[in-house]
Image (cartoon, helix red, strand yellow):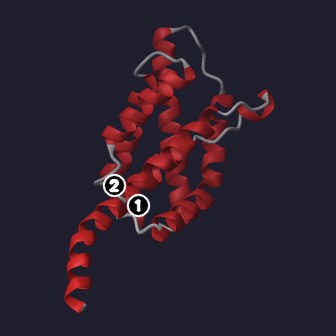
Amino acid sequence: LHRQSELIKSLISPVLEKSMRIRRSSVIFVSIVAALVLQITPMPIQADLYRPDWVVLALAYWTMALPSRVNVGVAFICGLALDVLLGTALGVHSFALSISIYVLAANYQRLRNYSVWQQAIVIALLGALYHLVLFWLQHLMTSIYFQFDYLWPVVTSMLIWPWVSWLLRRTRRRFKVT
């Protein structure tokens, strides 16, 4: 009886391990899809001005936590999805996200050790870089002009970072995402 149970465990164990890996990987995917949905959710015009950069926040967390799994390539793909969802020129958000995540990925070991409020300041700087690159690219293609209201999402992203970071860390630990 003991040998049979060992045999069954040895046969089922690889299948269960593979399904756990798939479930763990899907946590990152689901959180990024949720960020994309939050990024395009309709809001009143007055509130839309302050919408945090949900995709930047999610990618920043996963890049700091698991840089080998979420990196510039994932940021580029998310940017393409964001371009399609928002109806902007293809590649605009991809380029801006890739630049921002590259800067973060290059310094992730240092940034991981910062307190959550120091990380929030870094997130604000990354968000400012993201928005300035977006503005620059859109200014090259159209004739838009810079307004400081364009940077309100940087402030809200900085303020919401501690909670987003806490929620994603809790999710990562609960599902043992490595």
Name the residue beneath numbered marker 1.
111
Name the residue beneath numbered marker 2.
107
Residue 160 in view: yes
State the CA–CA distance, disc 2 to disc 1.
6 Å
- The x, y position of residue 20, in whole percent, is 36, 63
Residue 125 in view: no
- The x, y position of residue 153, in whole percent, is 64, 39
Q: Amino acid at mark 2?
A: Asn
On screen, residue 175 above or below 98: below
Query: 49 left or right of 123?
Result: right
**Which residue is painted at 44% across and 47% down in the image?**
29
- Judging depth in this view, the residue of 86 and 4 nearest the camera is 4
- Judging depth in this view, the residue of 113 and 88 nearest the camera is 88
**Quadrant of the drawing holding the N terminus:** bottom left
**Quadrant of the drawing holding the C terminus:** bottom left
Q: Residues within 10 Å of mark 2 (few under 14, many from 20)?
A: few
Query: 10 left or right of 130?
Result: left
Number of callouts = 2
Q: Residues within 10 Å of mark 1 (few under 14, many from 20)?
A: some
**Which residue is painted at 66% across and 46% down in the image?**
156
On screen, residue 40 above or below 6: above
Helix, strand or loop under label 2: loop
- The x, y position of residue 172, in whole percent, is 46, 64
- Judging depth in this view, the residue of 146 and 40 nearest the camera is 40
Query: 58 left or right of 24?
Result: right
**Which residue is painted at 71% across and 30% down in the image?**
42
Helix, strand or loop under label 1: helix
- The x, y position of residue 73, in whole percent, is 31, 38
Give the label on residue 10, or none: none
On screen, residue 120 above or below 145: below
Label 1 near label 2: C-beta < 8 Å? Answer: yes
